Image (cartoon, rainbow, N blue to C red):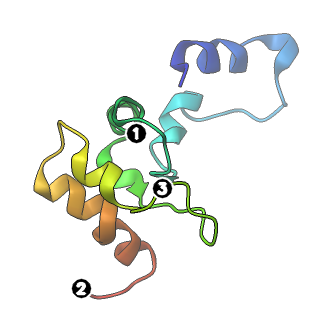
Amino acid sequence: MRRARTTACASRPTWTTGVKLKKKPTEYLKQMYYDTLVFTSEALRHLAAEVGVSQLVIGTDHPIPWQDKSIDHILKAPGFSDADRRKMLSETAAKLLKIKL
């Protein structure tokens, strides 16, 4: 994600949509949710660093699998705690869908 570019583009008078934002555009990114369907551990770590692990939810391309085991990339990515992995694999989705675990 290019935070500086996003903020710079949104602040240019000629590129405005006419909507006055209350926050920087990049601050809104932390209010959205993202799937974990990325192709490298580095990309997953970068996404988590940008928006927070609490905003990541397991993603798949079901019924067309892009890998044999859809959770291995989360389980094997270095730098995440067990609590982080639980959030990505179940807890955040459960919260969004109001499912009690």
Labels 3 and 1 touching (C-beta < 8 A)? no
Callout 3 secondary element: loop
Callout 2 secondary element: loop
Q: Is residue 65 above or below residue 97?
A: above
Q: For mark 2, does the 10 Å Cα neighbourhood hold few (<14), some (14 to 19), or many (20 or more) residues? A: few
Which of 23/84 is in front?
A: 84
Callout 1 secondary element: helix
Q: For mark 3, does the 10 Å Cα neighbourhood hold few (<14), some (14 to 19), or many (20 or more) residues? A: few
Q: Nearer the viewer, mark 3 or mark 1?
A: 3
Residue 22 in percent (x, y) is at 58, 35
**The residue under label 2 is which amino acid type?**
Leu
Q: Residue at x 49, y 54 (%)?
A: 35
How far apart are the alpha carbons under marks 2 and 3?
Answer: 27 Å
Q: Residue at x 39, y 63 (%)?
A: 69
Residue at the bottom extreme, as displayed: 100
How far apart are the alpha carbons under marks 1 and 2?
Answer: 24 Å
Write down the quadrant of residue 68 in the picture. Answer: bottom left
**The residue under label 1 is which amino acid type?**
Val
Labels 1 and 2 touching (C-beta < 8 A)? no
- The C terminus sits in image quarter: bottom left
Q: Nearer the viewer, mark 2 or mark 3?
A: 3
Q: Is residue 60 above or below residue 35?
A: below
**The residue under label 3 is which amino acid type?**
Gln
Labels 2 and 3 touching (C-beta < 8 A)? no
Q: Which residue is mark 3?
A: 67
Q: Is residue 96 above or below residue 27?
A: below
Residue 63 in the figure: left or right of residue 38: right
Q: Which residue is mark 1?
A: 51
Q: Residue at x 44, y 51 (%)?
A: 36
- The circle on residue 101 is 2
